[in-house]
Amino acid sequence: MSNTDVAPAASTQTPPTEPATPARRGDTLARIGLLLLRGRTLVVLVLLIILFGTMSQDYLTSGNLIVMTKHVAINAILAIGVTFVILTGGIDLSVGSIAGLSSMVVGGLLFAGLTLPGGGVLYLSVGAVILVGILVGALVGWVNGILITKFRVAPFIATLGMLYVARGVAQLRSNGGTFPDLAGSPERGNEGFHVIGVDSWLGIPVAVWIMVVVAVIAVVVTTKTPFGRRIYAVGGNDRAAVLAGIRVPRITIAVYVISGACAALAGMLLTSELGAAYPDTATTYELNAIAAAVLGGTALSGGRGTIVGTVMGAFVIGFLADGLVLVGVSTFWQSVVKGAVIILAIVLEQAQQRLQTALSQRTA
């Protein structure tokens, strides 16, 4: 055999490692950007605390932080209820009016009692009055759900109409007047309503503790129960949910009932804090609730979002509003800033979805 017939020996050297390509570096930067977008609510909250803490020495005092957190609690409870609705792809514009209606129902029961058919007056205990208030909110939410599921009314229209109906009934409750004194009396057995909105426990307002309890229950329901999984399924694709055997109308009605109950609770907390009930309680609060959910990453199209994100969104709105007041920004500019923040939240939500889709396609 000639030398030319001998095959060359295989090389034992490994090829040099190729440097990272621009595409790989781009993917790394995209993943970092996606991580920042997912945690944008926390980032914004931290930046707000740093900004206003630098601008005002009173902002980060323990007293002011407690007051701000107390203000956040009411909006957070409203927003938690709204989040259940938005997760299914719906919307609830009536929560502010439901809060006002519940406020007037509770205020009337504490101030004037319940007139009996025989002419007597029955005064309920504070616990019973609070239960009635929550049931009123749940009932209005149930009506919203029935309108949407049985009569095929669009959620926007159904809840917009209920916004006016509930506010009108709240005004009719006292002919536009106010129930001024809700302290109750020992003779009537209805003392103690101030506890939920004024008192503190372990140095923290009771309203904040109530917010924590509501948030924990909502987190457990949405993440650990079949009902929570069905909510996400309905919001992700209601047609697929029907084919999977999920009773979509029942889920839809249930989330509106939850939203109404949360709105009623928030209205009672606000009424307790003010010490009086008036028909315009919680006017436009529905906008803050929806904004908190959106800021927290809940998609208006449904199927995406978390309760924790919503609570953080409520903190962003609350801390921003109180910070603007503390540094002396006028009311008009406060509205401009809050509106800009909401628009920015929507833009960032869309950017997150586009970036996540692009990364998924590259991986595939």
Image (tube, helix red, strand yellow):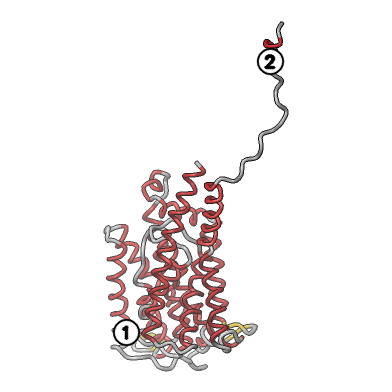
- Is 167 above or below relative to 88? below
Q: Residue furthest top?
A: 1
Disc 2 to disc 1: CB gap under 8 Å = no
Q: Amino acid at mark 2?
A: Ala
The part of the image, by quadrant, that contains residue 155 is bottom left
Q: Position of residue 122 (x, y in %)?
A: 42, 86
Structural distance between the alpha carbons of marks 2 and 1: 101 Å
Eye-nearest disc, 2 or 1: 2
- Which residue is under mark 2? 7
Residue 301 appearing in the image: yes
As rendered, which of 76 and 189 lies closer to the eye? Answer: 76
Left or right side of 335 for 158? left
Which corner quadrant holds the N terminus?
top right
- Is 109 above or below relative to 136? below
Residue at horizontal 53%, vertical 73%?
45
Q: Name the N-terminal-most of marks 2 and 1.
A: 2
Residue 254 appearing in the image: no
Q: Position of residue 64 (x, y in %)?
A: 56, 86
The part of the image, by quadrant, that contains residue 209 is bottom right
- Which residue is under mark 1? 173
Q: Which mark is residue 143?
A: none
As rendered, which of 130 and 155 lies closer to the eye? Answer: 155
- Is 164 above or below relative to 256? below
As rendered, which of 295 and 267 lies closer to the eye? Answer: 295
The part of the image, by quadrant, that contains residue 343 is bottom left
Residue at horizontal 59%, vertical 84%?
60
Left or right side of 25 for 241? left
As rendered, which of 210 and 362 lies closer to the eye? Answer: 362
- Secondary structure under tag 1 reads helix
Q: Amino acid at mark 1?
A: Arg
Residue at horizontal 43%, vertical 93%?
181
